[in-house]
Structures are given as C-alpha cells and as structure tokens.
Image (tube, coloured by chain):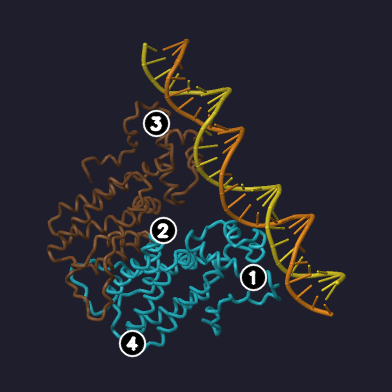
Chain colours: A cyan, B brown, C yellow, D orange
Amino acid sequence: MGAEDSRLRPDRRAPAQEPRLRADALHNRNRILEVAADLLAERGLDVPMAAVARHAGVGVATLYRRFPTRRALIQEVFADQFAACVAAVDEALTCLDPWDAFRGAVEQVCAVQAGNPGFNSAFVAAYFEEFGISGELDRVTCGLNELARRAKDAGRLRADFATSDFTLLIMANSGISAQAPEAAPTASRRLVAYLLDSFRADRAAPADSLPPPAPLDLYDILRSR
Amino acid sequence: MGAEDSRLRPDRRAPAQEPRLRADALHNRNRILEVAADLLAERGLDVPMAAVARHAGVGVATLYRRFPTRRALIQEVFADQFAACVAAVDEALTCLDPWDAFRGAVEQVCAVQAGNPGFNSAFVAAYFEEFGISGELDRVTCGLNELARRAKDAGRLRADFATSDFTLLIMANSGISAQAPEAAPTASRRLVAYLLDSFRADRAAPADSLPPPAPLDLYDILRSR
DNA sequence: GGGTAAGTGGAGACCCCCATCCGGTTGCAC
DNA sequence: GTGCAACCGGATGGGGGTCTCCACTTACCC
C-alpha cells in the first residue's frame, strides 16, 4: 500500500482531491461502490451501468457524474484487491527464506485473483493497460521478479524460470477464475501447487521430459500492443 | 484421425442428410463456413452474425436459413478441431508406452485448443453444455481418463492425479489462449510442459511443498449446472 | 432562514445486434 | 425453353446498452 491503509474503514475513502463532496453525494458515491463491488463480482466487468445505478437506488446520471467511465468505476472498486496484491508482494520481500517468500507471494496473489472473478478480469485487463493502474501492477511484477531472482540465487528456483512465467501463471489462473468462479479458489490453489512444484530447483528434470520452450517475453508482447 | 480425413478437402462436406442443396446455396454455405472460421478465430465467439454475412457476401437471411442459431454455425465451423482432439486421444490410446501416450494426448489437445482462440472458447463452452457437442467432448474426456489410469497403473503418473486435473489443465490453458492469442501456441506449450513435469510420478514431492488440495470434481460441478 | 451552487433522476437520442418477413430472382428437372 | 420450388437479400421491428441533457430538489454557508 501507499502510506495510507484506510481500506478497512467502514466508510470508503473520499475521492482523490476533488474540492469537496456534499454529504448526500458522498453517501450515494459509497453506496454505488458497495453495490458495484457485488455486481462486478457476480456478473462480470460488463454489467450494465444502468443495473449498477438501479441497485444503488440512484439515477444513471448520478453514476456517470461520479464515475465518468466504466473504467473509473472498476478501478475504484478493485483498489482494495490491487492493494492486497501489492501488500502480499511487499510482505514477501521482507521474508528471510527466498523460497518461502517466492511461494508465498505467488500463492497470495493468485488467491486474490481467484477469489473474485470481477477482479480477475480487471487484473488481467491491467496487463493490457486498459486501465490506469499500471503503476500498482508494475510494483507487483517488479516485486515478483526480485523474489524470483533471490530464489534463483539461493538455488531454490529452477534456473530456466523466466520472468514471463509469472504472466503464464496469471493467465492460466485467470482461465480457472473466469470459467469456474465458484470452484476457482480451490482449483486455483491446486493449479498453483502443481506449478510451484515444477518451479522448484531441487527436482531435477528427468531425461525424457519435454524441455520447456525458450522463454518468451509474454509480458513485453502484451505491454507493447 | 478417425477413419475419415476429409478435413483437407478443398470443398467442405455437405450438411448431414438434408434432402439436397442447390448449387448456389451450397456455394454460399461453404463461403459462410470459410469466412466464419476466420472471424470466429480473430474476433471471438460473439462476432455479430451480420458481420459474418457481410464478409461472406450474402444477406443475413441466407446465413440464418443455413444456420438457424449461432450455436449451429459454431458447431459446424469447429467440427475439424473437435475431430482433431478426438483423433489425438484415439491415437494415444493405441500407443504402447503409457506415459508417452498420456503426455502426447495432453500436449496435442492443448495445442489444438491454444491454436485457435475461437475454438478455445467453443471447447470450454462445451464443458458447460452450451453446445451440442458433448458427445465428442465425452469421448475426449473418457479417453484422457483411460490414459491417466494406464499411466498411473504403470507408476508413471503421480497417484494423486485427479480426473478433475484435466479440467484444471484445460481451464488454465484457456486462460492463455483467451488473453494472449498471438502468444498462445508457445506459451501454452510451456505451461503444459511445466504441468506435465508436476504430474510425473518419479519426482517425489519434497517435504516442504504444499500438498495439492483434495481433488475436487470440477468436471462434475460444471456439468451439473 | 434564505440564496445558490451542487446534486438529482428520468427521458430520450443514438448505436448495435438479433431474427423474421416478403417481394424479387434463379438453378434445375422436365 | 419453361415452370416452379428453392433461394436470395434488404428492410424492418424489437430489445438492450451507453451517455447526455435538463428541469427540479437540496445541502450548505452566511
């Protein structure tokens, strides 16, 4: 997180530095965010704006005035989840054991991702810079890369692990989350366990196994679109 | 391949047992299928029917007359890919080495899936019985289960591999295919290689690795919706 | 308490997609 | 060649979704 961790306060934080918000307007804004969180989670990123407004008991105009674009709404709604990912990585960076740190960060980020189908979509979309959250995303990916470097240096992570493998992991995890939302938390844990198993350095590759293809910088490919 | 490999013929096979089709009608039908294959691959399963018609140079009515529902069109368009999956499994079932058979089937099915984003969606959707192709899908899953059984009996596949892990694999693979279509073939191969690596029995799990969660019958969950 | 700027909700313009209907056209059997 | 059944494509109605405009209401500052 940044300096603030207001994210557990019952009332949501106010918008960035808007001059001020009238009491009724603030109330409506919070109500919209609550409702949007539910709807986005259960009906996906493309839930009609009108549905959000209706459930929040406000007019469409109010919704659009507060959040001019769908993107703005989504960004605000999933700020907590993004923060949780950043926090997980930051915490792992303070962990002494390089493998535990690596494993913990991967597990937690994937768990957050699989825990909310809506956030999953937003998180993946962030890779395409469709949302303005790349700052936080970069922090996550840089942190993960550092964790990978440490684990590799310590001889715990296989040497041919590539930066792009994080992207691989996240895309794979997104498939689980997108296709089977109810089962996602459990299924995701299992997928991650399997993959972490493969990532370990202390399991020498058997002779006849197919060597992974040359690392491909998926992350770069996606960002350069 | 099954017995037939008509799938390389320049002209598509005629519809099942419709009485007969006038020459111009048949020509249009084939043209629609060609165009639809391209559009579905590059723009996803929800490409507007009107766009298909326009690109094929026919009216919407003609498209609807030939393929009354979008499902019917998709089913026909991806019949080849479905057949390729069935063929891959059937071929693997004749392979002598249980591990090679298992590995080969998994690799080929995933490769077909990752090779075409449109087919990927259709394939995954088939799990939800949104399309009428469950017959072929069942054949694939049953075949895979049999291959898993053999590999396990031979002591090559880890004992805690679950039937639902195929679903896990396919969902994960679908994430790759859906999010990064251009990179999907390569990225998918790498993902599959990692996972196959984890599935091997001859890599004893290290003491501190997280045991995979209890197998969850994802497949059943999805089918029972 | 009163003036005012901020806030409100609903109506409606606009766009896209689906699916059907129907008057005109054409391949094909004879 | 000719008649007709099959075929064609554009027009059309219906349903939804996005986003804006505007006449009305209300919280807040003095």
Residue beneath disc 1: A27
Q: Nearer the viewer, mark 1 or mark 3?
A: 1
What's the residue at 46%, 36% (across, down)?
Answer: B64
Alpha carbons under labels 3 and 4: distance apart: 67 Å
Alpha carbons under labels 1 and 4: distance apart: 46 Å
Residue beneath disc 2: B178
Alpha carbons under labels 4 and 2: distance apart: 35 Å
Q: Are marks 2 and 3 in contact (CB under 8 Å)?
A: no
Amino acid found under the numbered disc labelled 3: Leu
Q: Quadrant of residue A193?
A: bottom left
Amino acid found under the numbered disc labelled 1: His
Report crowding for label 4: few under 14, some 14 to 19, many 20 or more residues within 10 A (C-alpha).
some
In the displayed structure, would residue B95 be above or below residue A5? above
Rendering coords of residue B179 (x, y %): 43, 61
Amino acid found under the numbered disc labelled 4: Asp
Query: In this image, B118 relative to B158: left or right?
Result: right
Alpha carbons under labels 1 and 2: distance apart: 38 Å
Q: Nearer the viewer, mark 4 or mark 2?
A: 4
Chain letter of disc 3? B
SS category of the residue bearing label 4: loop
SS category of the residue bearing label 2: helix
Q: Nearer the viewer, mark 1 or mark 4?
A: 1
